[in-house]
Image (tube, rainbow, N blue to C red):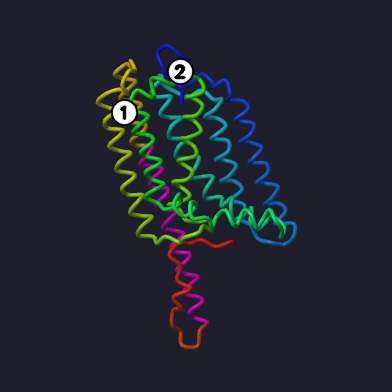
Amino acid sequence: MILAHTHPGPGVPLAAGPPAALATLSAAACYLLAARRLRRRGDAWPRRRDLSFMTGGVAVAWAGVGAAPGGPFTGHMVQHVVLGMAAPLLLVTARPLTLALRALPPGGVRRSLLALTRLRVAGWLTFPPVAALLDMGGLWVLYRTGLFAATAHRPLWHLLVHVHVLAAGALFAFAVCGLDPVRRRWGVAVRGGTLLVAGAVHGVLAKTLYAAAPPGLDVATGDLRTGAQVMYYGGDAVALATAAVVGAAWYAARGRALRAASRRPDGALDPRNVPHCAQNIG
């Protein structure tokens, strides 16, 4: 997310871009090794999840070192959609936490990781409205205050913005999709409603940018409007994809509950087998 009239534009890689890209690809390699370990011991792990994580990792790496198309602001918004929305969704749908819990041998490391998911603070952070506030609220602060223009002259700030956008986007996708095991199971109504509101807030922000550039930034009108459109329509596309993930997970969870009910003598649904979200370590 590099943009300024006095600083390299978004098409110019960050100074910290190559190390960040290397770290991202290393994480992807660790994911593949863990998945391979599961399969070698006879456990099932869909290869589509490998592909999802690899694609998300490549997207994050590209955002750090690649050249985005269009003018400075348009290129920045392409990076925003990729780094803050599309890549997090791809990474989350690969269920990395579930993979880690299944691949790690019984012992202190696995127990510690599982304990982290049960912490009260983890429960609050993965409460969908809180995750949405951290994600969307951060974007409003970035674009509707002088912070965005200030990052042009402060490389460290600029790098921290990258980190925040990726982390907040991943937390939001994690909380809304509800695929990995967490402390509290939130129903599809809470997660779907949060996604709807967050999508609307993101769209409104894009419209304000179509009308006026971030404070303190000089952007050509055509570049500004094209970038705002990328943000608006790109955000809608990722939101629809997220909704599809939520719906598919709910449908699969409901199917498991019905199959479990069919094995009961009375054929009744056991409330314990009707999950509020489709999370399971599997």
Tell me how far mark 1 sits from mark 2, CA to CA.
Answer: 19 Å
Q: Amino acid at mark 1?
A: Arg
Furthest-front residue in view?
A: 120
- Foreground: 76 or 122? 122
Magenta stretch, residue numbers: 234-263
At label 2, counting other C-alpha atoms closer than 10 Å, the crowd grade (few under 14, some 14-19, many 20 or more) is: many
Look at the image and tell me in which quarter the C terminus lies.
bottom right
Residue identified by numbered label 1: 144
Q: Position of residue 38 (x, y in %)?
A: 70, 56
Disc 1 vs disc 2: which is toward the camera?
1
Find out whether the residues at labels 1 and 2 contact each other: C-beta distance under 8 Å: no
Q: Position of residue 198 (x, y in %)?
A: 34, 45
Residue identified by numbered label 2: 9
Q: Position of residue 254 (x, y in %)?
A: 45, 68
Q: Amino acid at mark 2?
A: Gly
Q: Quadrant of residue 133?
A: top left
Question: Compared to 276, does 75 lie above or below?
Answer: above
- Foreground: 273 or 159? 159
At label 1, counting other C-alpha atoms closer than 10 Å, the crowd grade (few under 14, some 14-19, many 20 or more) is: some
Q: Mark 1 or mark 2: which comes first in sequence?
A: 2
Number of marks in the rendered image: 2
| Res 208 label | none
Furthest-right residue in view?
A: 40
Left-right relation of 204 to 269: left
